[in-house]
Amino acid sequence: MPRPRKARFVQGGPMANVFRPRGIPARDLEEVVVPIEGLEALRLSDLEKLDQETAAAHMNVSRQTFGRVLAEARQIVAEALVMGKMIRIQGGSYTLPGVGRWGKGGRRGRGRRGRHGPGSF
């Protein structure tokens, strides 16, 4: 039996949940999915400029786990940018401040679908 996954803290949902190349209909694009905790890792590392140890503490994970989540998110985003794919941000294993263990819609990789505004997860 695998070890239970530790809750990964995120500060909030994305401002937008889909990004796509301009001028190409969404139905004609391949899609990649970045989990919510991957977006949080990108935010803490690349936007907030936190070192991995500090960012890992913010997310309540080990430095090694943070590094793996960050590397996976960067790989997904790079693939989308280079190959012209649509990026969808959804799902993953996370919890929001003041919300239960897995957050709304964040239970074990099965996130809610649809439109979400800021903080509406």
Image (cartoon, rainbow, N blue to C red):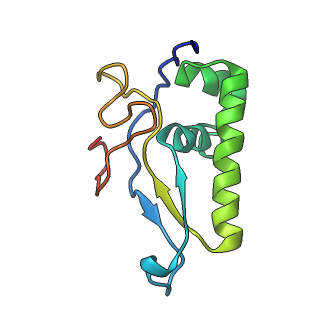
Q: Report whether 101 appears left or right of 109.
A: left
Q: Position of residue 115 (x, y in %)?
A: 28, 57
Q: Can residue 51 be seen?
A: no
Q: Quadrant of the N terminus?
A: top right
Which residue is the extreme one toward the front?
1
Task: Examine the rendered structure and indicate whether residue 20 appears above or below residue 71.
Answer: below
Task: Examine the rendered structure and indicate whether residue 66 appears above or below residue 28.
Answer: above
Q: Position of residue 6 (x, y in %)?
A: 52, 17
Task: Examine the rendered structure and indicate whether residue 27 appears above or below residue 104.
Answer: below
Q: Position of residue 18 (x, y in %)?
A: 43, 62
Number of residue marks: 0
Q: Quadrant of the C terminus?
A: top left
Residue drawn 52% across the image and 53% down it:
33
Residue drawn 72% across the image and 32% down it:
67
Which residue is the extreme one toward the bottom?
23
Q: Can residue 26 be seen?
A: yes
Residue drawn 37% across the image and 42% down it:
111
Task: Examine the rendered structure and indicate whether residue 37 appears above or below residue 87.
Answer: above
The answer to which quarter of the image holds residue 16 is bottom left
